[in-house]
Amino acid sequence: MAKVKTAFFCSSCGTQFSKWLGQCTSCKQWNTIVEEVVQKEEKVAWQTKSSTGMKRASKPLLINEIDSTQEIRMNTLDQELNRILGGGIVPGSMILLGGEPGIGKSTLLLQLSLKLPYKVLYVSGEESQKQIKMRAERINPNNNSCYILTETNTQNIFKQVEEVEPDILIIDSIQTLHTDYIEASAGSISQIKETTAELIKFAKETSTPVILIGHITKDGNIAGPKILEHMVDTVLQFEGDRNHVYRILRALKNRFGSTAELGIYEMLGSGLREVSNPSEILLSNREEELSGTAIASTLEGMRPLMIEIQALVSTAVYGTPQRSATGYNLKRLNMILAVLEKRAGFRLGMKDVFLNVTGGITVDDPAIDLAVVASILSSNEDEAISKDICFAGEVGLSGEIRPVNRVDQRIQEAEKLGFAKIFVSKYNKITYQSKNIKVVLVSKIEELVSALF
């Protein structure tokens, strides 16, 4: 019997050490180094059926000699996912999908497997084939190109891959897989690294895209070493509240597209429905006008969104006033309150201010500053802003309204949704002409206040 070898790994960054240390010398984290059993054997590289004899090493090529023709992407027939990935799935790519337990990761990928016009092998290490069949019957029962395999050993998975020869491989989840080359429990750092490396080798040599589901920790990070996210090509995050029906899909890393895009789904009994017009869920259908509410025009990637900003300003009961923001940067809220106090003369220093972006999304676009100012002043004066008014502008420290990018696209989206008036900075260069929406140009907060109240 071979001697059992052990090594020490950092659970944060995956660095290997010969002995235990209190602090990782690579990522400087404390108490993250754990001991694991490592029993290495002679590895058999992934071999395609066509490869015979000795494998030739790759040769260096001049950059001008490399074929630069555009790679044909695989259409997922899901417009939200296509846009987030940059136009579809790139052959040979590795995609990692993370999210809270019960948020709908398995449902999303099973629905994708049943919808794709390609041969898909869906490997599950968490559910039986009958359990997956029960869910598939709710989503799309008449599919003849999706194969279901319940297996956790990578060597057995590759044997089935050789027989089925799928166009896309889906693994649910990477934390359940284990390889025979390492004697460690499934889900450990060494197993996650080794199984992911085997799958990457398979994906690159066969040009078969592999989609992995990854569990996350209580901190919201994908479980396992951070190197897992460096190894894959795309990292997707599936977010949302299990008490609500809407889910948000965003890219944290994407080697083949933008990371600024956003996809919104609605969880139904028959699966996930694509929400093509997100403004329908981000704007409340209120009949009566209420103070403290303003509509902002924002952008997520290439997509314009209309979101509702709610503010509540009240007299502080205790000595220190409270400042609270949901879906908005609290430090930026404090900056805007200081600008209103200093430049516009509003006495907000001894008042509680609460701010909320409806729909459960977090917005970083500075163009919603103007709507934040309008909602705060509306709540402070207890005067409602008309439902057909929206805002797009950044607020500077001297109280000026600064221009925002792609203002024409924001105006078009506001016009499409039936808004009658939009406030923007007068320093914006506007080329879009419309008779259905009035564009109000403002340069300072004082002009906004006189126009609204």
Image (cartoon, rainbow, N blue to C red):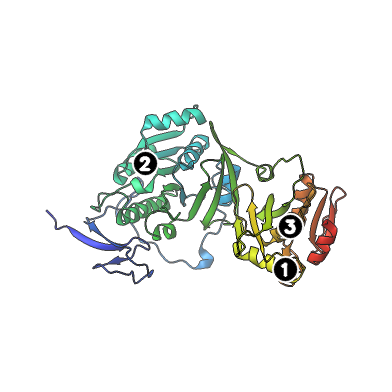
Q: Secondary structure at mark 3?
A: helix
Left or right: 332 as drawn, with respect to 225: right
Dot placed on the residue nearer the N-terminal end, 1 or 3: 1
Label 3 sits on what residue type?
Asn
Question: Looking at the picture, does residue 92 appear above or below residue 120?
Answer: below
Question: In front: mark 2 or mark 3?
Answer: 3
Q: Which mark is residue 380?
A: 3
Q: Secondary structure at mark 2?
A: helix
Dot placed on the residue nearer the N-terminal end, 1 or 2: 2
State the residue position of label 2: 161
Q: Where residue 218 appears, x then y in whole percent? A: 42, 53
- Of the 4 image quadrants, the one containing the C terminus is bottom right
For label 1, the crowd category at 10 Å Cα-Cα, with few meaning under 14, some 14 to 19 and many 20 or more, is: some
For label 3, the crowd category at 10 Å Cα-Cα, with few meaning under 14, some 14 to 19 and many 20 or more, is: many
User: Could you give the CA–CA distance between mark 1 and mark 3, rounded to whole angstroms?
Assistant: 12 Å
Q: Nearer the viewer, residue 330 or 361?
A: 330
Question: In front: mark 1 or mark 2?
Answer: 1
Dot placed on the residue nearer the N-terminal end, 2 or 3: 2
Label 1 sits on what residue type?
Glu
User: Could you give the CA–CA distance between mark 2 and mark 3, rounded to whole angstroms?
Assistant: 64 Å
User: Could you give the CA–CA distance between mark 1 and mark 2, rounded to whole angstroms?
Assistant: 66 Å
State the residue position of label 1: 341
Label 2 sits on what residue type?
Val
Q: Where residue 298 appears, x then y in whole percent? A: 69, 55
